[in-house]
Amino acid sequence: MTYETILFDVAEGVATITLNRPDKLNSFTAKMHEELADALKRIQKDASVRCLLLTGSGRGFCAGQDLGDRVVQPGDEPLNIGAYLEVGYNRLVRTITSLEMPVICAVNGVAAGAGANLAFACDIVLAAKSASFIQAFCKIGLIPDSGGTWTLPRLVGQGRAMGLALLGDKVPAEQAAQWGMIWKAVEDDALMTEAQAMAAHFATQPTKGLALIKQAIRASSTNTLDQQLDLERDLQTIAGRTDDYREGVAAFMDKRKPNFQGK
Ligand code: T3D
């Protein structure tokens, strides 16, 4: 498939997806969902890929749903937005959160609506200091989707999640970092260098182990301590059987740098 709405590149263990409709602040269309799903399938099938880096082109990261595709004329039947969610955003968030490698989001500009919640679905979010996050849904009569009502309270607590969702205020990147919504806010001109360096680092790390860490941390929000202890036991059993664990211990004992293969 050739892509019209995203850029896709794989090099040295890192897949980079760039949302690429800059004149519409990279807002989502059905085509973009289709292309993202295709690119993510390619990543899942390509054993050489050990990290995904997601970013946007131009001055925005993503302004959520392209509202030009959602105009309802007087007298028209209402839209079934739930059906759009199921085939688009829900599938996307499920794939990103279960991808068996770290997913870094480099938020280069405004992230609004589903654009903000897509970023929060990623494992590590770096944002340019000029970027911002907006739960824009309340301004058009919708609720935060793409996992927002689940992710936000877990990131910032119910009080702040409620305020953000009900008011739709813009949260600048540095405040987002202070509130724990994202990993870090960086100088604008350092964003891609820093994100790419982190991605290159992940591409040399024990990928299987990192995927298991991601699985355990994500499961913790709905597990009891007992369930989580059981899960840690099970996942650690898997981790302990990987080649990379063997290599990590051997390299430590030999006082040398490990050479992880991601298996
Ligand atoms: O329907 C479903 O499938 C359900 C799923 C819903 C998920 C959602 O994401 S709902 C929320 C949708 N998003 C929004 O409501 C955000 C709308 N955009 C904005 O509020 C503002 O654009 C921003 C705050 C994000 C940025 O403001 P600003 O002043 O920096 O830029 P701008 O001038 O508003 O936008 C620049 C251009 O992008 C402009 O086009 P133009 O006039 O130059 O031709 C604007 O219309 C366009 N644009 C921005 N956001 C969208 C968009 N076009 C279509 N859809 C957008 N969401």
Image: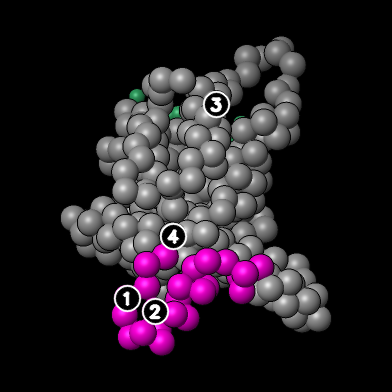
Q: Main secondary structure of the magenta part?
A: helix
Residue 223 coordinates in the image, percent (x, y): 77, 71
Q: Secondary structure at mark 2?
A: helix
Q: Label 4 sits on what residue type?
A: Gln
Q: Are marks 4 and 2 in contact (CB under 8 Å)?
A: no
Q: Quadrant of residue 255?
A: bottom left
Point out the stretch of residues depicted in magenta: 238-260
Foreground residue, 201 or 4?
A: 201
**For marks 1 and 3 on the same chain, the one whose residue lies earlier in the sequence:** 3
Tell me, yes or no, whether the highlighted magenta stretch contains residue 85: no
User: First in sequence: mark 4 or mark 2?
Assistant: 2
Q: Position of residue 2 (x, y in %)?
A: 41, 20
State the SS at label 4: loop
Mark 4 vs mark 1, CA separation in Å: 13 Å
Q: Is residue 218 above or below residue 251?
A: above
Judge the density around disc 4: few (<14), some (14-19), many (≥20) Cα neighbours within 10 Å.
Answer: some
Callout 2 amino acid: Ala
Q: Any mark on residue 261, and which?
A: 4
Looking at the image, residue 120 sits to the left or right of residue 23; the answer is right
* Distance (Cα) linking label 3 and label 4: 31 Å
The residue identified by callout 1 is 257
The mark nearer the N terminus, 1 or 2, is: 2
In the displayed structure, 204 sits above or below 59; it is: below
- Give coordinates of residue 221: x percent, y percent: 70, 69
Q: Which mark is residue 251?
A: 2
